[in-house]
Image: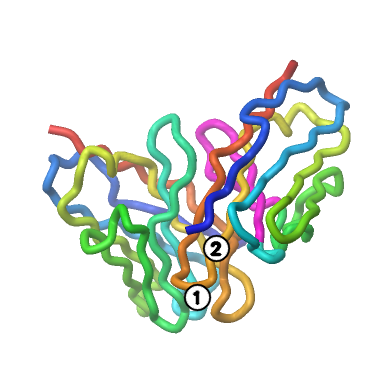
Amino acid sequence: EIVLRQSPPTLSLSPGERATLSCRASQSVSGYLAWYQQKPGQAPRLLIYDASNRATGIPARFSGSGSGTDFTLTISGLEPEDFAVYYCQQRSNWPPIYTFGPGTKLEIK
Amino acid sequence: EVQLVETGGGLIQPGGSLRLSCGASKFTVSSNSMTWVRQAPGKGLEWVSVLYRTGSTYYADSVKDRFTVSRDNSNNTLYLQMNSLRAEDTAVYYCARARGLWGLEYYFDYWGLGTLVIVSS
């Protein structure tokens, strides 16, 4: 089973700053990695798929990069509504087992 | 607009059974792969099961042999039958649509609002 690790667990930044969130897989997931944003009391929202493709309606300040085992979600110019928990997620090839990282909480400094 | 609505959650005693429903709008459940994801109170996301458009199903080890995912094409609805419920199954259960290359669907683009299941005596 592929394990995803996210760092840091908590990131404290101010609006306008740049956020860099990391997701590391215990073995290669190729480029099949997704990122989600979740706010309190809400369902997760897909941000990025295939490591770097923005989902429909996601602002350009969100970008994803990486391949293999190391991935990054970057938020350029934090807006107040960006403070939330972010999860990375992947699927192992066979058997299909889906895993989420433990999440990074992005909080207002 | 695509919409998913989960129903069926509630308070259930340990060992009991519950069936969750996920009604879909603006797309056809049977033509898509669908998944269930849960979130225990204050915890992260945990994948539960997937039903591929081919009809194949897979489960997390934590629910295997207790939970069954299915769909009703006529009602455009996804189900999760949960048996032998345990306290650790307490969570908000979300259904979501799975997308990606055929046979490699892995990311979830639309989610419902979730339904809360509490397993307690």
Crowdedness of circle 1 by 10 Å Cα count: few (<14), some, many (20+)? some
Principal secondary structure, stretch drawn in magenta: strand
Residues B2 and B69: in front is B69
User: Going 36% across and 58% down the picture, which residue do you hit?
Assistant: B60
- Marks 1/2 same chain: no
Q: Which mark is residue A91?
A: 2
The magenta segment is A33-47
Residue B62 in the image: state x and y as whole percent: 31, 53
Q: Is residue A13 magenta?
A: no
**SS at mark 1 in the image:** loop
Quarter of the rendering containing residue A40: top right
User: Going 62% across and 61% down the picture, which residue do you hit?
Assistant: B1
Q: Is residue B62 above or below residue B90?
A: below
**Mark 1 lies on residue:** B28
Q: CA distance from mark 1 to mark 2?
A: 23 Å
Chain letter for mark 2: A
Quarter of the rendering containing residue A104: top right
Farthest-out residue, front: A27
Crowdedness of circle 2 by 10 Å Cα count: few (<14), some, many (20+)? many
